[in-house]
Image (tube, rainbow, N blue to C red):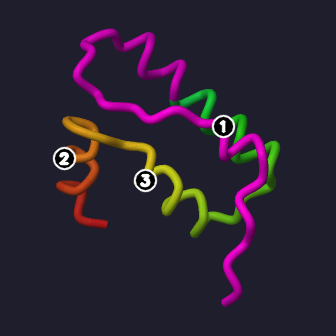
Amino acid sequence: MVPRIIPEATSDLKDFHGSDQDEDRARSWVTTVKIAFKSDQAPDDEKCFVFGGLLTEKAQNWYRQLGH
């Protein structure tokens, strides 16, 4: 499989650290990510790769515990 170049909408996404207890902020971030994926027509495998790479700190620890 040849890697795809990350389109602009996806490359502009900000990291999410998860230390903020504001659920609305988390939902807003997820919505922004979903919109970027749709705009870039990202395939599912790329979505998983990019999503995991955007998480840091507590959010990354949570993601790793999901047992993909």
Mark 1, Cα crowd under 10 Å, few <14 / some 14-19 / many 20+, is: few
Compared to 54, does 16 lie above or below?
above
Residue 6 percent location from the top left of the image: 71, 58
Which residue is outermost to the bottom? Answer: 1
At horizontal 25% and vertical 13% (from top left) the residue drawn is 21
Distance from disc 1 to disc 3, alpha carbons, whole Å, reads: 13 Å
Residue 35 percent location from the top left of the image: 71, 35
Earlier along the polypeptide chain: callout 1 or callout 3? 1
Q: Which mark is residue 53?
A: 3
In the picture of the structure, the residue carrying the numbered disc 1 is 12
Compared to 68, does 21 lie above or below?
above
Left or right of 58 on screen, residue 36: right
In the picture of the structure, the residue carrying the numbered disc 2 is 61
Left or right of 8 on screen, residue 28: left
Could you say whether the residue bearing mark 2 is in a helix, strand or loop? helix
Q: Determine the main secondary structure of the stretch shown in magenta.
A: loop
Instruction: Reply yes or no: does residue 57 show up in magenta.
Output: no
Distance from disc 1 to disc 2, alpha carbons, whole Å, reads: 23 Å
Q: Amino acid at mark 2?
A: Asn
Q: Which region shows up in magenta?
A: 1-29
Earlier along the polypeptide chain: callout 2 or callout 3? 3
Could you say whether the residue bearing mark 3 is in a helix, strand or loop? helix
